[in-house]
Amino acid sequence: MPTRPRLLSLGDRVRYDRREHTVAALHGTSVRLVDDAQAASVVLLGHLLASEGFAVLSTGPARPPLPEEGVLDGLPEEVAERARWWQRHLTELMTGRPDGDPHTPVRTEYDPEVHSVRQRELAKLAELRQAGEQVGLSTMRRMRSRFEREGVAGLVDGRQRKPATGTGRADPRVVAAIEQVVNSRTNEATVSAQVLRRQVERLLADEHGAGEVPMPSRATFYRLLEAVSTGRYLLGSARTRRSAGKQPKRMFGQLTAARPGEVMEIDSTPLDVMVVHDDGTVDRCELTGLVDLATRTLAAVLLRPSTKAVDAALLLARDDT
């Protein structure tokens, strides 16, 4: 039976230059190939397709699945088992092999080189119904699409999924202690991660007793600290951290001004300029501007030594220039 013409996709196994390769990347008209000895090469797609002896030996999934480690951990056993069941059947539907192993023979009815996606879906649907599984075609398509986008995580009922927190399977008591310490540092001076680790350790001992909650390894603690404090500049500039902490806890949206002067926006930026005061001291300076949102014009501009944003606003309000 003649094979259907198709485009190359990631994970395909091809024969080129008398060796077998895996398609590792596609960029424009270039194809990156990796052979069994892990030697990489980049060839033009037109040259590859026209080369002597070129053949597509097997196909990979339409998209490489996302990492699956820990995705099903903590879920009810029946939910995790159902996700694995879908994974086996959808992998077979997409690649012709239930385990995705390129060395496993392809089942004829699921061969992507011979049958279209719809033909393979109908074949899988008939197989499942014969086995007593009442699965509709729309459900099959929806699950295949989610598997291609999200990997095995997309096969889990959304009501059963764990929220992505970035803390993985860490002890929730440790995570809560880290959050408490991070929250307390907003207006404090910047300290090292090692100091924060000791603060977390003392907090856990005070709340749960000494030695009751084991501390994670240093590398794990740093990872948790980064996940909890993302966007809060915990180990960065104290001034930036305090400014970020004063931002309103609300969703940003679009604000429309109907007339000049209705809404004014103020912002300051440090300049790479040093100034000398009357007393001979040297200081940095900031440029603060007041912008009218309706007309997009500068209502006032002020060049002053470094000062707090609220002080700059007061200076602009009473500045006559």
Image (cartoon, rainbow, N blue to C red):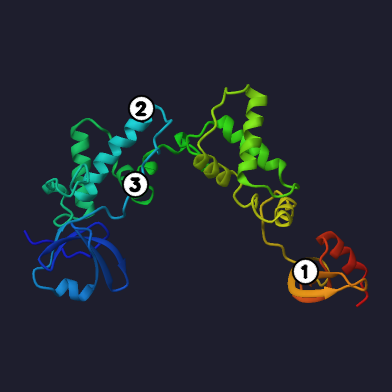
Who is closer to the viewer here, 13 or 139? 13
Q: Earlier in the sequence, mark 1 or mark 3?
A: 3
- Report the disc number at residue 147: 3
Residue 105, position as x, y percentages in the image: 11, 46
**For the residue marked with disc 3, what is the amino acid?**
Phe
**Distance in Å between CA atoms under marks 2 and 3:** 19 Å
Who is closer to the viewer here, 164 or 171? 171
Determine whether, in the image, residue 137 is placed left or right of residue 1: right
Q: Is residue 275 above or below residue 71?
A: below
Mark 2 element type: helix
Residue 215, position as x, y percentages in the image: 55, 32
Q: Earlier in the sequence, mark 2 or mark 3?
A: 2
User: Which residue position is annotated with label 2?
Assistant: 78
User: Which residue position is annotated with label 1?
Assistant: 258
**For the residue marked with disc 2, what is the amino acid?**
Glu
Q: Quadrant of residue 315?
A: bottom right
| Cβ atoms under marks 1 and 2 closer than 8 Å | no
**Residue at position x 64%, y 41% in the image:** 196
Q: Earlier in the sequence, mark 1 or mark 2?
A: 2
Q: How many marks?
A: 3
